[in-house]
């Protein structure tokens, strides 16, 4: 769980920025921020399913959580570094949360 | 794609695969058999315990009297239907209120039949639990009890499995077009195994994605629901399913004698969903203010929301349809959408061909994890140069090879033997369920211990022959029961498919045993799969990396 040294490879090739492994920080970003994003995504889905009974739409919202969470976790290693993973995923969370808040304001009015 | 990504995702694939692989082998092997739970249940039930079906409405006196007289049955009891007739036995369960919601081992099973004099006879009847045990192995990756913590372990394994799927695809993508249709059978056996691993993985990828994601849901749905109820639904979710019991004295208890007979209940559901074939009636709270009967059944032309099929909820007195949310063939689109996730996991759709397809996909999945472990071992082999010294191999590869052989073959042999034992145990021992569990784990742990003691190469062939013998014991038990009914074993022609499938499985295992024996005898000696002791320089026959089984 340590950052893999990528310096040698960087020297060998002309690539400007090698991808850092950053196992711990990327995995944590995927686990934590992926999970929060999946819950917010289920909240966004619920705003679109208002005409269904909660007993049904709630199940659909629950089924949305693992795919979103695990897809984020699986793709988190594409980020160039752990720091970028945290930054982008925090941004995505904030954006989704803002959108959810906006839709709910609109829905209440 | 940049080489960096490939390198990183190769690490992800390696480590998720190696951690989850053997648990997933057990889950897939046991799960492939669980698809045929009902035939296996009938195969393993002694004929004496089977009851002749009677016309549906002949069971009505039994239902009415038992539900009225036995409070536990009044809360919930089931009547099984078979081909338009009823099995005249009412069954119900009493749960230990302190035990885990999903822990089936603490449940006590009761049944009631009508004596010739018309009185209700209740007795506690522990089920054989053989098929339930195999299902538990499937659901909690080889652990003995389906409890909450064990399902959380399964959930972690499933999440790792999903990561392994995505990372495997990422690693393969750049060469997918080149490699997909290439199965390079030849001298480079590792290349061939890798090609086979890739082609099986890519071809069955949709199946595996469905399995991984739904397994995570099955592990953590309670927790996700609880969290969403707080954060998303503002408490509306828990109120959507009122579980509150009516307090006694609120309404006079109703008399079950006023309920509609089974044939009327079934007809109401058939009218609502043409093609529906009833398999059971599940009565609940029939004396209370909210009486209900769930008419369970299958509909071969529709998606079934559960492994057992689907159900319509009726008022047993008025026959009013209370809910068709789970009625195969009459569901609303959102409910059908949700049910399809269950159906895709449990093969409860599409008629007779689908279970066989799932059996094959499940076995192919088990092979995928097995071959993945072998590739891990083989990738870390230090090859002997032609004429060079025999290199010292890493200890972890030898241990991983032993574990893979012991766990995988031990699981196959253990399940086979505990299945075969179903024809010999009834009437001879008490506590059938414990015997089935004991037999499985004895064989399983003996195989694992043997594999570590002897090393993978020298354990693999005897273990495979053991698996052949255990699997052959399944049709042999039926054959003996047919030839010599005095032994207590039995055979049933309608369930010959179980015996023939086991026979085919035994033949396949025998083929593997022979191929492995050849490999162990004459393969390259720098491999963990070579039984020959390291020999002086110059004795090695080949420099191609090679893997144990088929050549």
Image (cartoon, rainbow, N blue to C red):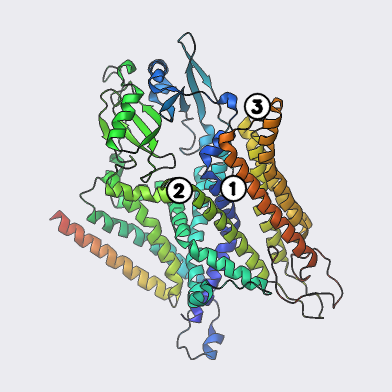
Q: Position of residue A79 (x, y in %)?
A: 43, 75
Which residue of the protein is positioned furthest toward the top in this rendering? Answer: B117
Residue B36 - label: none
Do the numbered discs 1 and 3 sit on residues whose CB atoms are within 8 Å?
A: no
Rendering coords of residue B206 (x, y %): 44, 60
Q: Mark 1 or mark 3, which has the lower sequence index? A: 1
Per the image, the residue denoted by label 1 is B142
Task: Say which residue appears at 49% left-offset and 10% top-offset.
Answer: B116
Label 3 vs 2, first from the N-terminus: 2
Measure the alpha-carbon separation of dots 2 and 1: 21 Å
Secondary structure under badge 2?
A: loop
Which secondary structure lies at badge 3? Answer: loop
Front: mark 3 or 2: 2
- Which chain is home to disc 1? B
Q: Classify mark 1: residues with Cα within 10 Å, few (<14), some (14-19) or many (20+).
A: many
* Residue B177, above or below A66: below
Q: Which of the two residues, A96 or B23, is positioned nearer the viewer here?
A: B23
Which corner quadrant of the image does residue B280 belong to? top left
Dot 1 falls on a residue whose secondary structure is: loop
Q: Which mark is residue B347?
A: 2
Classify mark 2: residues with Cα within 10 Å, few (<14), some (14-19) or many (20+): many
| Label 3 and label 2 in one chain | yes
Q: Compared to B13, does B113 lie above or below?
A: above
Residue at position x 40%, y 57% from top?
Answer: A66
In this rendering, would A70 be left or right of B370? left
Residue on which disc 3 sits? B430
Tell me what residue is drawn at x 49 percent, y 34 percent: B99
Residue B328 seen:
yes
Spatial CA distance of label 1 from label 3 is 24 Å
């Amino acid at each position: 769980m340590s950052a893999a040294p990528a310096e040698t490879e960087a020297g060998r090739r002309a690539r400007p920025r090698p991808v850092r492994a950053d196992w711990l920080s990327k995995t944590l970003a995927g686990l934590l921020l992926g999970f929060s994003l999946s819950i917010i995504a289920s909240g966004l889905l619920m705003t679109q399913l208002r005409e269904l009974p909660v007993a049904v739409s709630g199940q659909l919202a629950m089924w949305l959580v693992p795919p979103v969470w695990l897809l984020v976790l699986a793709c988190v290693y594409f980020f160039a570094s752990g720091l970028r993973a945290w930054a982008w995923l925090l941004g995505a969370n904030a954006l989704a949360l803002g959108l959810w808040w906006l839709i709910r304001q609109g829905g209440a009015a | 794609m940049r080489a960096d990504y490939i390198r990183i995702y190769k690490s992800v694939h390696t480590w998720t695969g190696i951690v989850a692989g053997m648990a997933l082998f057990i889950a897939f092997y046991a799960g492939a058999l669980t698809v045929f739970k009902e035939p296996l249940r009938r195969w393993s039930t002694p004929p004496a315990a089977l009851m002749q079906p009677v016309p549906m409405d002949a069971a009505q006196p039994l239902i009415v009297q038992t539900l009225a007289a036995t409070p536990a049955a009044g809360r919930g009891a089931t009547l099984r239907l078979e081909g338009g007739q009823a099995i005249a036995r009412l069954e119900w369960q009493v749960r230990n209120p302190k035990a885990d919601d999903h822990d089936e081992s603490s449940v006590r099973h009761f049944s009631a039949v009508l004596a010739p004099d018309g009185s209700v006879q209740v007795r506690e009847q522990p089920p054989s639990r053989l098929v339930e045990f195999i299902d538990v192995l499937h659901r909690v990756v080889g652990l003995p009890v389906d409890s909450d913590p064990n399902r959380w372990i399964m959930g972690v394994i499933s999440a790792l499995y999903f990561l392994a799927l995505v990372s495997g695809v990422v690693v393969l993508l750049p060469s997918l077009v080149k490699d997909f249709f290439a199965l390079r059978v030849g001298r480079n056996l590792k290349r061939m195994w890798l090609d086979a691993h890739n082609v099986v993985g890519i071809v069955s990828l949709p199946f595996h994605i469905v399995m991984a994601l739904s397994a995570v849901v099955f592990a953590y749905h309670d927790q996700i629901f609880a969290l969403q109820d707080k954060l998303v639904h503002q408490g509306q979710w828990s109120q959507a399913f009122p579980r509150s019991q009516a307090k006694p004295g609120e309404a006079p208890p109703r008399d079950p004698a006023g309920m509609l007979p089974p044939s009327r209940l079934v007809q109401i559901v058939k009218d609502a969903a043409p093609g529906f074939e009833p398999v059971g009636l599940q009565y609940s709270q029939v004396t209370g203010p909210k009486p209900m009967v769930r008419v369970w059944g299958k509909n071969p032309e529709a998606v079934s929301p559960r492994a057992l099929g689907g159900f319509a909820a009726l008022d047993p007195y008025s026959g009013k349809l209370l809910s068709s949310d789970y009625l195969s063939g009459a569901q609303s689109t959102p409910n059908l959408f949700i049910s399809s996730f269950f159906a895709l996991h449990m093969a409860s759709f599409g008629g007779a061909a689908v279970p066989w397809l799932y059996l094959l996909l499940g076995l192919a999945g088990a092979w995928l994890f097995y071959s993945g472990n072998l590739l891990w071992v083989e990738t870390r082999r230090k090859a002997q140069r032609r004429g060079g010294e025999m290199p010292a191999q890493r200890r972890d590869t030898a241990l991983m090879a032993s574990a893979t052989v012991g766990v995988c073959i031990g699981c196959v042999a253990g399940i086979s033997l505990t299945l075969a034992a179903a024809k010999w145990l009834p009437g001879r021992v008490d506590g059938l369920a414990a015997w089935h569990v004991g037999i499985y784990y004895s064989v399983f742990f003996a195989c694992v211990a043997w594999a570590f003691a002897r090393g993978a190469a020298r354990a693999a062939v005897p273990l495979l022959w053991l698996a052949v013998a255990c699997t052959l014991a399944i049709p042999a038990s039926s054959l003996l029961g047919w030839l010599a009914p005095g032994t207590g074993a039995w055979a049933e022609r309608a369930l010959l498919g179980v015996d023939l499938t086991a026979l085919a499985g035994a033949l396949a295992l025998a083929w593997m045993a022979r191929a492995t024996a050849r490999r162990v005898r004459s393969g390259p000696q720098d491999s963990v799969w070579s039984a020959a002791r390291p020999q002086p320089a110059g004795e090695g026959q080949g420099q191609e990396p090679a893997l144990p089984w088929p050549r």
